[in-house]
Every structure is written in C-alpha cells, then in structure tokens.
Image: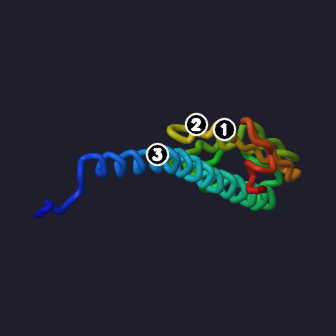
C-alpha cells in the first residue's frame, strides 16, 4: 500500500496554533523589554546634563535653564524622550526627561526628574528605584 508522504492538514493546523500561542506570549514580553531598555537612555541623558550643569556653574556661578548653553538639545535622550530644564537658579536646578511617541506605552515610567542634590524622581506606576535602573 502506497501512502503519500507529507503533512496532513490537521498536523499543519496544530503547528500554526502552537506558533500563534508562542507569538502571543513572546511579542508583548519583548515589547516591554524594549520599552525598559529605552529608560536607560533617559537616565543617562539626565546624568550627562547634570554634569554639564556643574561645568557651566564653575564658569558662570549660576545654573542655566537653556539646554543650548550646555551644548545639548531636547533630543539628547534619543527619539523616545524629550529633555528639559524646568527650573534653574544660581543655586539649584531640576532636569526632566518625558516619554514621547511609542515610549508613552511604558506606563511604568513616563517621566524622570533629576535634582541638583542628586534626588531622583519618576512618574508612572513603577517605583523610582525600578525606573532608574534598580530591580
């Protein structure tokens, strides 16, 4: 008796269902991983701006609220965050990175703030420690 070789339609459908289940689990997990990875760009940029602020202070005896004075712009954190200096004075400053575009899907950490004192804040559903790279 000759039997045709190959896969039956049932076997093929089982494979398709298994692949679909794996994709349904893997894709959202990967997306969250990517969003968390972008957080490091924001925190790195804030620390870079803080360093530039200190250099600026030594030359001008005051901090600036203008990113251009620091040789930077609002896109220093990449395409996923906008950086700004909402307040600066002769003795203090605050730097903020706010999520934009697809990064706003990361509801855990939508904004990061760094103060001159080194205090770190974040907004979103995650704790500040998690947003700034803690576990």
**Label 1 CA crowd tier, 10 Å (few <14, some 14–19, many 20+):** many
* Quadrant (top left/top right/bottom left/bottom right) for the C terminus: bottom right
Q: Which mark is residue 127?
A: none
Q: CA distance from mark 3 to mark 1?
A: 30 Å
Q: Is residue 1 left or right of residue 6?
A: left
Q: Residue at x 17, y 62 (%)?
A: 5
In terms of secondary structure, where does tag 1 sit?
loop
How many angstroms separate mark 1 from mark 2 (CA)? 6 Å
Alpha carbons under labels 3 and 2: distance apart: 27 Å
Residue underneath mark 3: 21
Q: Report the mark closest to the observer, 3 or 1.
A: 3
Q: Nearer the viewer, residue 54 or 29?
A: 29
Task: Give residue 26's position: percent from left, percent from top.
Answer: 51, 50
**Residue placed at 49% from the left, 48% from the top?**
27
Is 99 positioned to the left or the right of 113 in the image?
left
> What residue would you read off at disc 1?
110
Q: Which mark is residue 104?
A: 2
- Residue 106, image x, y percentages: 61, 40
Task: Pick the residue in front: 26 or 38.
Answer: 26
**Secondary-structure class at tag 2:** helix
Residue plotted at (73% across, 46% down): 64
Residue 70 falls in image quadrant: bottom right
Q: Position of residue 39 (x, y in %)?
A: 64, 51
Task: Give the secondary structure at mark 3.
Answer: helix
Q: Residue furthest front?
A: 1
* 11 relative to 110, above or below: below
Q: Are marks 1 and 2 in contact (CB under 8 Å)?
A: yes
> Tag 1 or tag 3, which sits nearer the N-term?
3
Q: Quadrant of residue 128?
A: top right
């Amino acid at each position: 008796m000759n039997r045709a070789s190959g896969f039956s339609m049932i076997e093929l459908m089982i494979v398709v269902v298994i692949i679909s289940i794996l994709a349904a689990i893997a894709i959202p997990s990967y997306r969250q991983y990517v969003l968390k990875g972008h957080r490091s760009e924001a925190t790195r940029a804030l620390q870079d701006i803080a360093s530039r602020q200190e250099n600026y202070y030594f030359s001008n005896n005051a901090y600036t609220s203008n990113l251009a004075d620091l040789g930077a712009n609002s896109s220093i954190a990449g395409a996923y965050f906008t950086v700004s200096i909402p307040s600066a004075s002769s003795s203090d400053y605050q730097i903020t990175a706010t999520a934009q575009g697809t990064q706003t899907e990361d509801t855990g950490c939508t904004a990061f703030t760094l103060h001159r004192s080194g205090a770190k804040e974040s907004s979103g559903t995650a704790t500040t420690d998690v947003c700034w790279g803690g576990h």
